[in-house]
Amino acid sequence: MFSVFRKTSESKAVDRTPRGVLPTFMTDELVVLSKASPTIRNTYEIRLALYMAVSRGLRFILAVRPHAAVDPTIVSLLHEHAAKIEVVQLEDFCVYFGHDSPSGEKDGWVLGDATAFSALKSTIQSAWLLERLNVGHEFSGAELGDLVVALRNECISALNVDGENVGQALMQLVAAAHKEGGSVFIQ
């Protein structure tokens, strides 16, 4: 059961801030997490949503857009727990910001649904940032420095599902990505 949180056999225990998850749809029988990114990474968000479903005896569906590439470890994990992936046209989806390094995802948090993402984007003044603030985008290398500059010039008041200021939480992901040679991604 607790293998839901397992990423790989060589993963080490990481001190994580307890994080929330926001399923796109939930009933007494089913939990659906919809992801709009063209690439679906093995993230804490997906593992936590799966754990929520399995621990409550509910079916789990990861809904993805047509032609999305799903990380094979997620496919295997879902298969192991009798969950499934459904390819659908999505009207709503959950948005996750994460930080990864060469060894995999390190940290991340859920912004909210498509409406929350749209609301965040409507407050952004930087054309550079607005152009890149899309599900599927990855900030890496020199672009991380540009992201810091853009974020410093924004006045972001939006909160993520954990009640953290999105601008500050993004800066923390960028700092970690700089330190570990990784990237910040939006899924």
Image (cartoon, rainbow, N blue to C red):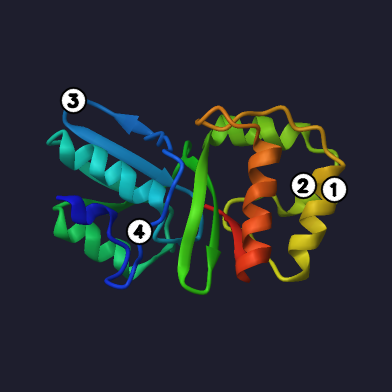
Looking at the image, which residue is at 14% across and 50% down? 1
Which one is closest to the eye, mark 4 or mark 3?
Answer: 4
Q: Secondary structure at mark 4?
A: loop
Q: Are marks 4 and 3 in contact (CB under 8 Å)?
A: no
Q: How far separated are the C-alphas under marks 1 and 4?
A: 39 Å
Circle 1: residue type: Ala
Q: How far separated are the C-alphas under marks 3 and 2?
A: 38 Å
Q: Which residue is mark 4?
A: 13
Q: Secondary structure at mark 1?
A: helix
Q: Which residue is mark 3?
A: 28
> Which of these two is toward me, 69 or 155?
155
Q: How far separated are the C-alphas under marks 4 and 3?
A: 32 Å
Circle 3: residue type: Asp
Q: How far separated are the C-alphas under marks 2 and 1?
A: 5 Å
> Which of these two is toward me, 180 or 110?
180
- Of the numbered discs 3 and 2, the one sitting upstream in the chain is 3
Q: Mark on residue 127?
A: 1
Q: Residues within 10 Å of mark 4 (few under 14, many from 20)?
A: few
- Of the numbered discs 2 and 4, the one sitting upstream in the chain is 4
Residue 139 visible, this angle: no
